Image (cartoon, rainbow, N blue to C red):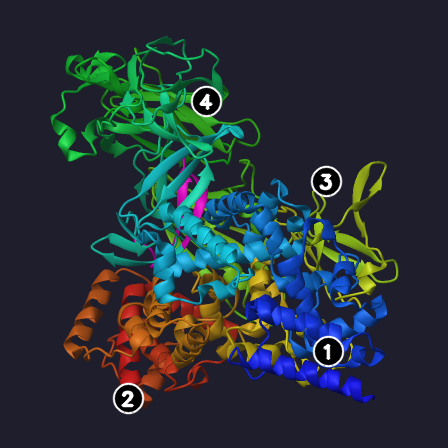
Amino acid sequence: MGQSEYISWVKCTSWLSNFVNLRGLRQPDGRPLYEYHATNDEYTQLTQLLRAVGQSQSNICNRDFAACFVLFCSEWYRRDYERQCGWTWDPIYKKIGISFTATELGTIVPKGMEDYWLRPIRFYESERRNFLGTLFSEGGLPFRLLKESDSRFLAVFSRILGQYEQAKQSGFSALSLARAVIEKSALPTVFSEDTSVELISHMADNLNSLVLTHNLINHKEPVQQLEKVHPTWRSEFPIPLDDETGTHFLNGLLCAASVEAKPRLQKNKSTRCQFYWSEKHPDELRVIVSLPDEVSFPVTSEPSTTRFELAICEDGEEVSGLGPAYASLENRQATVRLRKSEVRFVRQNPSAGLSLVARAGGMIVGSIKLDDSEIAIGEVPLTFIVDADQWLLQGQASCSVRSSDVLIVLPRDNSNVAGFDGQSSAVNVLGLKALPVKGCQDVTVTANETYRIRTGREQISIGRFALNGKRASWVCHPDETFIGVPKVISTLPDIQSIDVTRYLSGISIEQCHIQEMLGAQYLSIRNSNNETLLRRKIGILPADFSIEIKGGMHANEGTILITTQHPCVAKLKDKTLEATRKRTEGRTEIQLKAEGVPPAFITLQVLPNLAADPIDIELPFPAKGCLALDVNGRPLDKNITLHDLLGSRAFLFSRNGEPTKYTLQLYLRSVSGLQAWHEWCYTALSDRPVELNLYSLREHIENLISLEAGIDQVVEMRITGAGVVMAWQIRRYKYSLRYDYEKELLLSQSVNHRAGQIPSPVIMLLSEPERKSIPLASRMSEGVPVGEYELSSIVNKNGPWLVVPKPGEEMAFRPCFIRGESSLPVEESNIRSLQKATQLFNPQAEVNTITLVLGQMANDPAHSGWQFMRSLYDQFGYLPLATFEVWRALVQHPQALAMSLFKFEMSAEYLSRIENEFPILWEFFPIFEIKAASERFKLFLSQKGAPEETQKLLVTNMFQRLGLVFPTYADEIEKWLSNGYLPPSIPESCVHGWYQELLREHSEARWPEYGCKRLYKWMMSQKNPVIGINPDANHRYSVAWLPVFAAAVASGNTSFEAVFDRKPGAVFFLRQVRDFDSRWFKTIFQCSLLRYVAKK
């Protein structure tokens, strides 16, 4: 080595050491290079250094030279890249006066990136290592181009932020959203590169997180507020901060994020529905349902668990899931805390009402009707006001709005319009004619009634009206059908004094006889000017009306019994089903008989008033035993997938008109002999069958599937009762793929093939989850796909690979692993990224490479592995987590799992999925690991420059979210986790009082008994038990004592193995014990845990 070369190396080493030390580090910590935020002076020094070192063969193998070179390249991209530069090394070489061959770059870039900066290398889709793309992505966004297209970029980013929450709710990642928006924009081409799209999506995530964690929506000046609580917040963004324009630009993005987040983050005290129409989707009406933190509702039947599945339903069908929730039961009233603050979806039947429904074991146990969720499309004028690039429904029938840019959708019948001053060219909205109204106008629409719409005026709240009465429990048309005449009430108390008159089909209610009020009627409310404020089609049945259905001697026979003292005509819509009819005073009996297989449902038309339209009541055919139907109303196949349960239902009928007991069981068909099952009991009464939504059982099925390794388990669903036993086999996947390494061909294999349907697989590189997956096309035979997929030799140039279903793919299949290139031997000390750990993972090896990196991640919240896991979750979270070895290793690593709670910001979805998809009970998790992780996370925030007050605020907010998802971590536990506060000990008298409440609440229930004897033995071995409860019956031991034992495990005072085997089945049954009464478990767990902690 020459002296000049040695001096050059020393210069590189010295410069790098100084660069890292100035940032408070001894060595690089694996962060993206743009987060080091090299200054303009440092960039100039680095340029001069590389020019001075010059071209030398010996530089190629020098790590410190390589580190300087890659840092320069990334900074050049951020600072000097321009539109004409293209995607090439030439401008970089020109700047520093040196150049390298592709072979030389193959040595330099990995040495600099992986060996020094601890950063991974990206790959091209052609499977060559993408050195240029790697360095550009490390630099951030090309700022010269950003300044050139400042306003356009800000507009694009505002669109991303505006759709951010909607995309998340719909299951799309920020990366997918950013890619879709950028592709439609007029930004320079370089912003469409994967590296730029990925950076922009990370910026959206960061901005959204800053607004959420620092509550910036409540501050007029979000930038100033963030400066106070987190002065170094800009350092997380890939934009030069020593440029005033860069600072101004980031300020603008933060303000945009705060504005876009405000509507969705403001707390809701009640439910609210907002309806939107867009010209892009002229036949769709979208709704945003805003939800409060907590709701209460009466329990219609006693549930066997306090863990409910919640959903929004329209016309009896689930349209949006809200996830599970733990209920507190008191006096047949349930209170639940909701995990979602809003949901969005397209209305399928806007004229029907929406309800929030709670189910247990598939059966509805309670519901709340959502006010103002019915839209009378085609019946009355609908008034929309402009709202950004959409139209917001502001009023139905007569109304007055402040906006002067309005769209009035006219009724379906011929309408006469007066007072309209504008172009007659109409817009088509939801298949109806609509008038665009500008300015201050007073428009009168005369159709079936008279409506007045005033625009550009002071908005007058005339109040909203609700119907209060006993609703028919069957599915009816009209959707709102009542037993007896309902009352009309105003939802605003101050409106009661307004002079309004109620009409039924144009006749004042005061002038109607009771018989004239029955049947399908148009209810309208008019003011003193005879202007209609509300018009709605409703059904009114006699107050003593009831229906019973009974099965016959044979499967194709049955009976419908209709009881009422009012004269009533009832007939079947399908007259061929009616065999005979008997009439007695106040009672009609219709005998049914179907030729061959009976239909799943029948329609009964009831005409209680000959002058009105009939009311259609949809009933299941009076079958015997159990009737299980798929989404199309056909008998449910015996071999199905989880997806096939969507829209499926089961009806349980009484036997011979007597109350009949049924049991539904979900069994895991275990290959290891594991015994695990869910069980629910129901009672079918004579008046109607029990209806079960089978899709709402999917979480319980996934729960069973998670108990064994792998992803090919089968769950048997068995329904027993009324002398019959019916069973179905449920799998996660319908297809599997087998890879033929010699032919480089994927072959599909089906469990239950349906003609004409084959999988649509995509292939992903396991070591780069942020990268776009590649669709695979099937071979064709005479124009028909045959389910065979060719893979070119690219899979052998990299790896490992995984072939997976694309998002939303119905024909889901078992992912197929393809090893790709063979793993090279490497020293354990050199594995510092999940990318490399995934490439080198070997399940047979003594050392688990992924576990090695998780150990590093547990102690370093800034580790690149967290971004790897975030990308994996965002891009492929639609797949079971157990698909990926990374997640399986994480749940076996308590320290890393605890840190993941903070890195995923205590997301309700993340916490729930970890428990549902793996044999984990969070209440048994070592609570001191969570507290230790919070301290490491606060240290990380401190190193980022966050003041101590901000650190505490962020961590406290996260613990509040943890308590919202799992109530056992709320209240006093949350306070202890946040600030170490220990409340005074609760008197034993209170504990005994709670136990008496538990006995009263569940006096008739069947108590879960798993682990009774073992928990009794453990409790008796405690010299000074923290809780003095002594149940008077053996079958109550588990419910009474499990929270005490769980607290002992969580606090480290005993081990799980001291009582139970460390097997998935134990965790499964203990969940059932925990969920029997969540209020009892929470209270005793918290009380016990705090007493254990106080003794530490």
Disc 1 crowd rating (10 Å Cα; few below 14, some 14-19, many 20+) is many
- The Cα–Cα distance between marks 3 and 2, rounded to whole angstroms, is 66 Å
Picture residue at 41% right of the left edge, 80% below the top: 932
- The Cα–Cα distance between marks 4 and 3, rounded to whole angstroms, is 39 Å
Name the residue type under label 1.
Phe
Range covered by the magenta-colored residues: 302-323
Disc 3 crowd rating (10 Å Cα; few below 14, some 14-19, many 20+) is few
The residue labelled by disc 1 is 65
Q: From the viewer's perspective, is 117 left or right of 604? A: right
The residue labelled by disc 3 is 755
Name the residue type under label 4.
Ala
The residue labelled by disc 4 is 579
Residue 645, placed above or below residue 281: below
- The mark lying in front, picked from 3 and 2, is 2
- The mark lying in front, picked from 2 and 4, is 2
Discs 2, 4 touching: Cβ within 8 Å: no
The residue labelled by disc 2 is 1095
| Residue 125 image point, x, y percent | 76, 56
Name the residue type under label 3.
Ala
Q: Can residue 277 be seen in this view?
A: yes
- The Cα–Cα distance between marks 1 and 2, rounded to whole angstroms, is 56 Å
Q: Which residue lies furthest to the right in this view?
A: 742
Q: Which of marks 3 and 2 is nearer the N terminus?
A: 3
* Closer-to-camera residue (416/915): 416
- The mark lying in front, picked from 4 and 1, is 1
